[in-house]
Amino acid sequence: MPKPTRLAPAARRAQLIDVASRLCADRHVGTVGIGEVADAAGVSRSLVYAYFGDRGGLLAAMYLHNLDQLNLELDRFLGDRLEAVQLRQIIRRYLMFARDNLAAWNVMAAAGTLQHPAIVAARRERIERIAGVWGSDPTARLVAGGVVGLLEAGAQDWVDHPEVGLERTTEVLFAVLWEGLTGLRQHGFVAVS
């Protein structure tokens, strides 16, 4: 193996995350190993282990990188209170992020199921940040957690079954979040008694 180019630690870490993400673009995250990432990056396995500890640490780093990108997009729509227009924009951007960054989304979906401490902390921080906009009390946190969960599940279903269409998916998720199940019935999306 040729000697790896020396990079600053932050640059090397970013490079390894990028290489691992590219390897996961066409395959399930679970099929990509540390050795393959090391080979593709032109570094030793021990260097990858030194940066991430283990495969779970690498997946967590990939998840956090992608979550940062999603949060940057969503933060533009979080105001000091929730309005219908903002909620529609948040839902739409969430769906568009999943569609336009499919490899990143697949990494997030797979890594999000891990109970890695960094992932758990990032999810908690994200929910707290959203809850802070809505009142920062336990009820706001419960609502924020439910909204995030619904958006993640809805986006995953839409990525798997895109025939529903972006606009309709946005409106269905908006109706669930804004008006609840009775809103779905009023709009004719589902038959709810």
Image (cartoon, grey):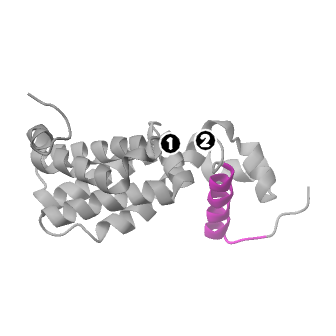
Q: Give left or right: position of 178 versus 14.
A: left
Label 1–label 2 contact, CB within 8 A:
yes
Residue 16 shown in magenta: yes
Measured in 3D between alpha carbons, the distance from the residue under mark 1 to the one under mark 2, in whole angstroms, is 8 Å
Give neighbour class at mark 1: few <14, some 14-19, many 20+ (Cα, 10 Å).
many
Closer-to-camera residue (77/180): 180
> Crowding near pointer 2: few (<14 within 10 Å), some, many (20+)?
many
- When asked about the image quadrant of residue 41, the answer is bottom right
Image point 9% across, 43% down: which residue? 186
At label 2, the amino acid type is Val
Residue 99 drawn at (x, y percent): 47, 55
Give the extent of the magenta segment: 6-23
Residue 42: image location, x then y, percent? 82, 58
Left or right for 90, reference 158: left
- Please say whether residue 141 is visible from this viewpoint: no
Residue type, label 1: Ala
Residue placed farthest to the right in the image? 1
* Residue 125, magenta (yes or no): no
Q: Is residue 94 above or below residue 185?
A: below
Please give the residue where the numbered disc 2 appears in the rendered image: 29
Name the residue tied to disc 1.
Answer: 111
SS at circle 1: helix
Res 78 quadrant in image:
bottom left
Q: Secondary structure at mark 2?
A: helix
Q: Which quadrant is home to the N terminus?
A: bottom right
Q: Where residue 92 appears, x then y in whole percent?
A: 32, 59
Quick check: 171 above or below 70? above
Which residue is pictured at 52% across the width and 46% down the height? 106
